Image: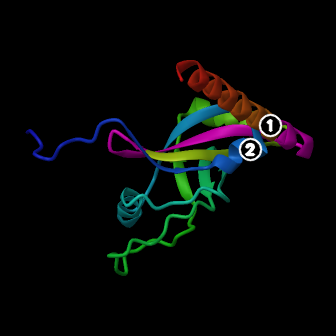
């Protein structure tokens, strides 16, 4: 049987956690599926979500996503979901075991980096991360500014060459 509806292809970004890359050293990344309710999927298709306060907790060999804000679907009725409910992550047993052993180490946490649709399915990119110290954050900011200044100088030199 051939479906008449066109299948989505590629990756469509919904939300990104830029603050996570600033606050943490990213050690390892994983792609996980999400167990969602119908109204959550519809809300995500509208491109509305926030990963800012999100974190992943492992308990009983299962991974759970906490504090990710998916607003209620505007056309939803009594079937609507609560915005900040915990959601189960779909990962392979090996990945969960690896995350469990590494997250036990001091200073390590699991944070969400990006929420997106991949070939029509909701996926989340999570990362095993270690918190940065204040001086690390300043160093990262300084490197970013230096890179920006160097790019500006190079483009100005190119403009001068052409003109």
Q: How crowded is mark 1: few (under 14 residues within 10 Å), some or many (20 or more)?
A: some
Query: What segment is highlighted magenta in the picture?
Result: 117-140
Position of residue 73 in the picture relative to residue 134 (left or right): left
For marks 2 and 1 on the same chain, the one whose residue lies earlier in the sequence: 2
Q: Where is residue 131 in the image (x, y as percent from the top left)?
A: 82, 43
Residue drawn at (45%, 71%) of the image: 81
Q: Position of residue 145 (x, y in %)?
A: 76, 37
Q: How many labels does the image show?
A: 2
Residue drawn at (42%, 58%) of the image: 47
The disc at residue 140 is 1
* SS for callout 2: helix
Magenta highlight on residue 122: yes
Compared to 107, does 76 lie above or below?
A: below
Q: Distance between the residues labelled 2 and 1?
A: 8 Å
**Most distant residue in the top direction:** 161
Q: Choose between 112 and 80: the one closer to the eye.
A: 112
Compared to 142, does 156 lie above or below?
A: above
Can residue 80 be seen from the camera position used here? Answer: yes
Residue drawn at (53%, 36%) of the image: 31
In this picture the colour scheme is rainbow
| Mark 2 or mark 1, whichever is nearer to me | 1
Q: Where is residue 109 in the image (x, y as percent from the top left)?
A: 75, 44
Q: Residues within 10 Å of mark 2 (few under 14, many from 20)?
A: some
Residues marked 2 and 1 touching at CB (< 8 Å):
yes
Can residue 106 be seen from the camera position used here? Answer: no
Q: Choose between 24 and 62: the one closer to the eye.
A: 24
Magenta highlight on residue 69: no
Per the image, the residue denoted by label 2 is: 22
């Amino acid at each position: 049987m051939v479906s008449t509806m066109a299948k989505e292809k590629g990756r469509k970004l919904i939300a990104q956690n830029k603050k996570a890359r600033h606050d943490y050293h990213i050690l390892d990344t994983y792609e996980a599926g999400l167990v969602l309710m119908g109204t959550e999927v519809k809300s995500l298709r509208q491109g509305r979500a926030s990963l800012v306060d999100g974190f992943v907790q492992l308990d009983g060999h299962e991974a759970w996503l906490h504090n990710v804000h998916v607003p209620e679907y505007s056309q939803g009725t009594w079937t609507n979901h609560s915005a900040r409910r915990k959601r189960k992550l779909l990962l392979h047993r090996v990945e969960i075991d690896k995350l469990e052993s590494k997250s036990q180490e001091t200073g390590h946490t699991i944070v969400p980096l990006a929420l997106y649709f991949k070939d029509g399915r909701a996926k989340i990119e999570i990362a095993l991360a270690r918190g940065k110290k204040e001086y690390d954050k300043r160093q990262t900011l300084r490197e970013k500014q230096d890179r920006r200044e160097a790019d500006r100088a190079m483009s100005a030199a190119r403009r001068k060459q052409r003109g």
